[in-house]
Amino acid sequence: MKKILIFLLVAAVYVLHQDFWNWRTAHPLIFGFLPVGLAYHAAYSILAAAMMAILVKVAWPKHLENIDGGESE
Amino acid sequence: MIPVIVVVIYLLLIAVIGSVAFRRGKANTEDFFLASRTIGGLVFFLSIFATNMTAFAILGSSGQAYRQGIGIYGLMASSSSFVIPLTIFFIGTRLWALGKKFGYQTQVAFFRDRWECDFIGTVIFVLSVAMLVPYMIISIMGGGRVLSDLSGGRVAYWLGCLVVVLVVTMNVFFGGMRGTVWVNFFQTILFLLFGAVAVAVISHALPGGFGEYITKIAGDPKTSFLVTRERMSPQFFWSYTLIPLSSIMFPHMAIMCFAARKVAAFKRTVVLYPLAIMAVWLPCVFLGVLGTQTEPGLKNPDGILLHMLTAHAPVWLAGILGAGIISAVMGSDTHQVLAVSTMFTKDVFAHYGGKERFGESGSVVFARAFIVFVTVVAYIVALLTPESIFELAVRFAFSGFAAMAPAMMAALFWKRSTKYGALASTLWVAACLVGTWYLQHISDNMLPKPGQPPTIIFPALGHLFERSIANATCFGFLPVVPMVAGSALLMMIVSLLTRPPSEATLKKYFS
């Protein structure tokens, strides 16, 4: 179930990249100067960061953490 | 001249950091190529970001935005902010683990063991080097051009390229991976700040504010396409989401993954990566569009940010921001040079007996000599060859590496994958690259005019192959789509038809 939910999350974020509704318009200008298509994709980058934070929280490959690490640079 | 002085001080600083790293180094390849796998925390994130961000992130993005508008951000940046962290999360962490467990320093070494076959490793090596070297050369060209532009032409192009080559060579020759990541720490912070500072400076200098300019662009039918995506086809836009699959397949990115100290280093990296992409790309794309109004009619729009900074920023600040651009060039260039050297040393020299004959310290000597050799050759080629040839080769390289991703995923996650499946997949990629080059070449004289639909290349085949201004396409999709799909299909079908690797190998990687 967890794997399906993770897959659905990633798929949903991927689908949101195709914002066909912003294709032919610059308006509204977000903050008075950012065309909506550009503001949307900037927000999309933030959404991608949030998605990765969720993946780190719920789907992290914990079994790899047992592999030893030495001194850090 | 002040900007050039600032940049020269910056370059000297990089050389000093490289020499300090040299004193910390040990005479073995694991230390030279991977800093003894000790890169951790914030240094890892900043370094892997610098590895992937070239001058294109600053100069090319603004230049493309000047030509095509805001769609460039969604096309290249936001798709990367989704795909690249995912590939680092799923593939990068596994590569790191294999490197720690079995000592791998290159992808090719893993492929050879995983599929019990030297030959498949050699084929992937040849294809990877053929796709990586043009990228390295174009980075040198980009650096030379930036130095020349920053100085207003006082520093000749050949001299600019020479300075870049010398600094990169010294940094990698003396410091290896350690010197490279130390410098990256400094470089990445500089170019992450570049965009915000440039926007602040330019907004302060422009009368009326950004909103007035954008409203004007949106209101004029001749320029309104710059603030929408009306001239960008949805197929083209979607196709591009496959291109960032190339990132983890570039040897310098995979090698960076091997260099992490702990897998935990990837956690912060994958979360911060999309935000860092936004910090660099958003201001550059926005300023590129704005530049169509403040600096109209540029013949080479890739220089738009340099023009705007020269016009609106104080000279000392223009110098620091110029250093930020140079940082983007050199950050990735040093990793590319190091990756080419790592691959030749480990996958050719050591693999074919050099290590037994000359030992670990002999391998490091070979690596250093190779670094000098490859940078001298790259410099000469950069001066003698037109940039357009390499621009095309690099575009193909992104598609090629993206189409190699199915082979990597199969190697890591699919027990049943075989060397024949990998070979079929790799040969498909190579054949597609040649085919795409041919289509591009024969359609160069049938380019559509801006705003016009693509031209059909072979009328008898209908819309199968078309030519847009920049690319040959397949049913309107970029070549990367059939390349990735074909590569994945061949990997699956041929693997299922051939004998799987031995039980011992499967146990080694999947138990």
Image (tube, helix red, strand yellow):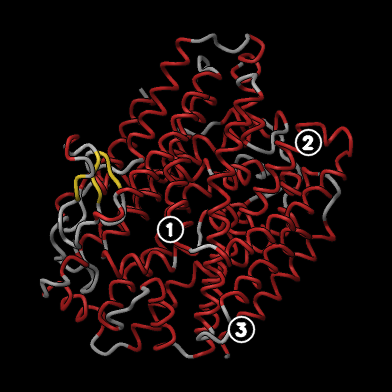
Decide which of A65, B372 is in the foreground and name it.
B372
Residue A43 visible? The answer is no
Residue count near mark 3 (Cα–Cα under 10 Å), binned few <14, some 14–19, many ≥20: some
Name which residue type carries label 3.
Val
Nearer to us of marks 3 and 2 is 2
- Residue on which the image places disc 2: B350
Position above or below: A11 against B181: above
- Type of amino acid under label 1: Ile
Residue B127 visible in this rendered orientation of the protein: yes
Residue type at tag 2: Ala
- Does label 3 lie on the same chain as label 1? yes
Of the 4 image quadrants, the one containing the N terminus of chain B is bottom right
Pointer 1 chain: B
As drawn, A49 above or below B59 = above
Are dots 2 and 1 in contact, CB under 8 Å? no
Q: Which residue corresponds to mark 1?
A: B277
Q: Nearer the viewer, mark 1 or mark 3?
A: 3
Q: Which mark is residue B6?
A: 3
For the residue labelled by badge 1, is the local secondary structure a helix, a strand or a loop? helix
Position of A2 with respect to B499 (left or right) is left
How much space separates mark 3 and mark 2, taking CA atoms?
42 Å
